[in-house]
Structure formats: C-alpha cells, structure tokens
Image (cartoon, rainbow, N blue to C red):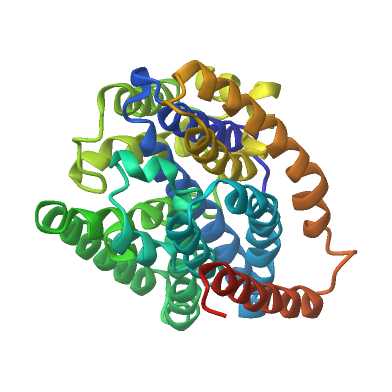
Amino acid sequence: MLYRKEIDGLRALAVIPVILFHAGFEFFGGGFVGVDIFFVISGYLITSIILAELDNGTFTIANFYERRIRRIFPALFFVIIAIIPFAYYWLLPAELTSFGKSIASVSIFASNFFFWQESDYFASDSEYLPLLHTWSLAVEEQYYLFFPIIMILLWRFGKNILLTTLIVLAILSIALSEWAWRYSPDFNFYMLPTRMWELLAGAFTAFYLINRAPTGNQIGAILGLLAIFFSLIFYDSGIPIPSLYGLLPILGTVFIILFATEQTLVGKLLSQKLVVVIGLISYSAYLWHVPIFAFARIASLEEPGPWVLGTLGIVALLLAWISWRFVEKPFRNKKLFTQKQVLITGMLFSILFILVGAQIAGGL
C-alpha cells in the first residue's frame, strides 16, 4: 500500500484536538470528534490492505490479527504497566477497584461495555478515570472481529454484493445512532452498533480508491478541512455524536483522504515534518494523555488549569515519542518476532492483564 504523509498528518489533526479538549481548552469544544476522525482513517487503511490482499489471494485471518496485535498491544500494555504504580499511590480503595476492573475489560477489548455502565463520557467525574479513552480501542477491535470475516465470505460473490452488504450495515448503523442518541445516549456514544458506520465510511473510501490513485483537488480538500475545523470549534458536548451531526467531520475526513494529495495546499500542510511526526506517534499520544490528565486532577486539591494540562499534553507527546520509538516500532519489525510468537504472546498478555486487573480489583 502506497504510503501517504498526509494521512499521518490527518492523524495529527485528530489527536491534537482530543488532547486539547481533555485539557479543557474551550476553543476546541468539539475536540472529541477527533476519535471519529480516527475511526474513518482506520476503516480506510485496514480496508485498503484487506482489499489488496484479497485481490492478490494473500489475505489470511492469522496475518490480519498478527498486524492488529503488533499495532495495538505493545503500547497499550506498556502504558498500563507504567500507570499502575500511580493508581496504587493516588486512588482510593473504591477507585482502585474500578481501575482494576477497567484493566481487565481493556485486556479483552470490552472497556466500552464497562464504561457504558460506569460513566457518562462528558460528566465531570469521568475526568478521573485513567483508562476511559480505551473505549474507542474496544469499538475498533470489536469491529475487526467480524469485518474481515464478512470480507472473506462475500468476496467470492463479487465486489458489488460485498459493497451492497456494507452499505446496508452502514445505513442500519446510522439509523440506530439517530434513535439511540435520543433514547439511550450512553449506549449511542460507547457502542459498536452505533459507531460502525464511521469505520465503514473509511471502508467505502478504500473501495472507491481501489486500483486508482487519489486525485488532487484543491476545493475538495479545503472543504474537507473546513468541515473538520467547523466541528472541532463549534461542536460541544451538547451535540450528539454519533448522529447525523457526525456526518460533518466524517465526510470532512473522507474528502481529505480522497482529495488532499501532496500537490494540494491541504496535503502540503498535512505533510509538514512536525505534523507527520505527531501523526506517527498519535496512537501512543492518545494512550498517554488521558491517564496523565486523570492523575494530575486526582493529585491536585483543585482543578488544574488548561495551561497546566496543556503542558502535561506536551509531556504526553514526549512520552508518546519514546513509546513509539522503543515499543511500537520494534514490535512491528517482522524480523524480530514470528507470527506464531506474536499471536501466542498477545494471547498470554491478555490473560496476564485480566489477572492483574482482577488482583487490583480485589477479585483474586
């Protein structure tokens, strides 16, 4: 798959507003839509890889999950290990029990179920939950449990049948989100059935670009960037996401993927070296910033100001570079670890952290 710097730049455009939103900068009242941008990017990249491998006859479930484990597990478990001592030091017994349960749920990518029952994402007390942000990882991994299977099963019937099936799923998903934000807003926010259409938006983008290169289009790319910035600045916690309101940042992201090549102004902006570097470390940055902010709030007698948390956001970026350089990158090197080693180690670490979470929660 052809590497595109602007996609990493788009990741930076997603993660920085999320960090600023969690730091309390009111200017980015809609910074939480950065997660939705991530969903589209993920859907696009993963579907592009699957389509290419299906076309070549090289796609296997084992290869797919090997890539997911290499991508997700090392940094995730590294961050959890790093924050456990702070949890023991600062959390009250009831909070520590909840933290242990969250570790166990993260380990099986079910933390969206856990936080659905435990916390309103936009409630003030949610700012004290070190692993709250892992709900989005759970949504993604649940999606990737069935998506590759659908792709394999329907590929033999042709792309039109496959694409039609995915379109039906997307329509059902967005219709459910429109119902759920009115009658079950927490379910709507945290759960896969109402979020699936966002990942599928990226998948449809991959289908459109299959066997063709993105075409630079200044107007399309600028419209995409404006749509994202509008939602980041003018949306707030009162805007239900996911819902039809989410079409603005979702379509904005799709437009950038389709039209922002390095020959366009938006593509050039997103391809700047610093922006690309932030995009490269965006996953680790996303993992680090919430626990850092949570423990800063827990340790303070009063709410830290946005500039204090903003400074800690820079610390999160520095830690993200370290974990990207010394944890993420080495584990992606296929010369260092075989597929069998990766799959077995991933399973063992999941079991280990379930036990660790249970021990912290007082269940063992």
Image quarter hosting the C terminus: bottom right
**Rendered view: 86 above or below 13:** below
Q: Is residue 271 visible?
A: no
**Rendered view: 116 above or below 245:** below
Task: Give residue 25's quadrant in the image.
Answer: top left
Q: Quick one: 21 or 154, which is closer to the camera?
A: 21
Locate residue 359, reporting x and y percent: 59, 73
Q: Quick one: 107 or 159, which is closer to the camera?
A: 107
Locate residue 302, reporting x and y percent: 42, 26
**Residue depicted at 47% across the width and 45% down the height:** 38
Locate residue 239, reporting x and y percent: 20, 36
**Residue depicted at 29% across the width and 63% down the height:** 117
The residue most toward the right is 335
Q: Quick one: 146 or 18, which is closer to the camera?
A: 18
Task: Give residue 347's quadrant in the image.
Answer: bottom right
Q: Can residue 267 be seen in this view?
A: yes
Relative to residue 87, is residue 349 drawn left or right? right
Relative to residue 5, is residue 342 drawn left or right? right
**Rendered view: 179 above or below 298:** below
**Residue depicted at 48% across the width and 59% down the height:** 93
Relative to residue 343, is residue 338 drawn left or right? right
Q: How many marks are shown on the rendered structure?
A: 0
Relative to residue 302, is residue 311 drawn left or right? right
Locate residue 332, reporting x and y percent: 77, 57
